[in-house]
Image: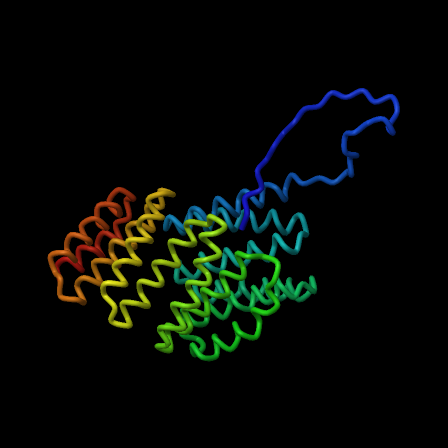
Amino acid sequence: MNLYKHLTEILLIIIFFSSCSSAPKDTGDIYYLRKNVETGLELANTEAAQGRFENAHLLLTKHKQMAILTDDPSLIIRSCLSLGNVLLSLERTDEAFEQWEQAIAEAQRLGNRELLAVCRIYKARGNLLCGRSSAQSVLEEVNRESPNIRADRLYIAFSWQVRGLAFRAVGSYREAEDAMRNSLNIHEKDLHLENASYDWYTIASIRSLAGNTTGAIQALESSIALDRRIENSWGLAASWRAMGDVYRRAGRQSEATEAYQRSRAIYVALENDHEVAEIDNRIAN
C-alpha cells in the first residue's frame, strides 16, 4: 500500500476575476479522515512488519472505524485485509477470517473485480497457512482470480507470492521459486525492499526444502542485505534464525550457533522475550 504524503499550504489569494486565476478550483471535498486512515494503515503495517502485532491490532481497529465513518469501500476493504493478517499472526484465526469475509462482501458490493480477486486470494492464503484448504485448491483459486488483477503491481506481486507458497506446499520447488522470483522482480524494480526481503526469505525456505543448502544461505544473505538497508530489525532476526536452522539441518553446528546468537541479540534488543526463548531452545537442542 502506498503512503500518501501530506503537504499543507496556506495561500492568501485575492481573485477579482475567476477566469484569470490559474489556481485549481475548490471541489468542496474533504479528505481529512481518509488521509488519516491511509497514514494509519501504513503505520500499522510497519508495526506488524516489526513483530509488534498487538500495537498493529490497536491501530488497525481504530483506523478501520475511521474508514467506516468515511464510507469509503476501498479503505474499508484494505483495513479488513490488514486486520485479518494481524489477527492471524495473533492466532485469532476465526476473527481473521471474519475480516477477510467482510472485505470480500464489501468488494462484491463495490463491484470491483480487481479488489474482489485480491480479497479472495488473501483468504486463500489464510486457508493455506491454517491448513483449512489443500495447497492444490489454493493454487487453483489463485490461478482463477489473478487474471483479474491488472492495475496494482503490489497486488500482482502478492498473487505470485501466494502461488509460490502453494507450490512449495505441494513440493513443486522449481515452480515455487519461479513464482517468488516474479514477485521479487516487481518488488525490486519498484523499490519495495521490505517485500523483496520477504521474497528472498521465502526463496531460501524453498531451496532448503529442496536440499540446496548453499542456495538457501545465499538467499538469506540477500534478505539480510535488504533488511539492513531499511533497518528492518524483525526481518533481520528472522533471517538469522532461519540461517541457523539451515546450517543445523546441514550438520554445521558451529555456524548454526553463531547465526542463532546473532538472531538472539536482535530479539533481546527488541525486548521480545518469546522469540528469545525460542532461540535459546534451538541453541540448547
**Up-down: is 8 above or below 111?**
above
Q: Residue at x 14, y 56 (%)?
A: 255
Q: In front: 254, or 215?
A: 215
Residue 279, quarter of picture: bottom left
Colouring method of the image: rainbow
Q: In front: 95, or 79?
A: 79
Q: Is residue 22 left or right of residue 89?
A: right
Q: Residue at x 77, y 30 (%)?
A: 23
Q: Position of residue 253 (x, y in %)?
A: 12, 60
Q: In front: 180, or 66?
A: 180
Q: Position of residue 203 (x, y in %)?
A: 35, 63
Q: Residue at x 28, y 50 (%)?
A: 237
**Up-down: is 43 above or below 246?**
above
Q: Is residue 77 left or right of residue 55?
A: right
**Up-down: is 6 above or below 252?**
above
Quadrant housing the C terminus: bottom left
Q: In front: 121, or 34?
A: 121
Q: Is residue 163 left or right of residue 266?
A: right
Q: Residue at x 25, y 53 (%)?
A: 240
Q: Position of residue 140 (x, y in %)?
A: 51, 78
**Total labels drawn:** 0
Q: Is residue 192 left or right of residue 103?
A: left
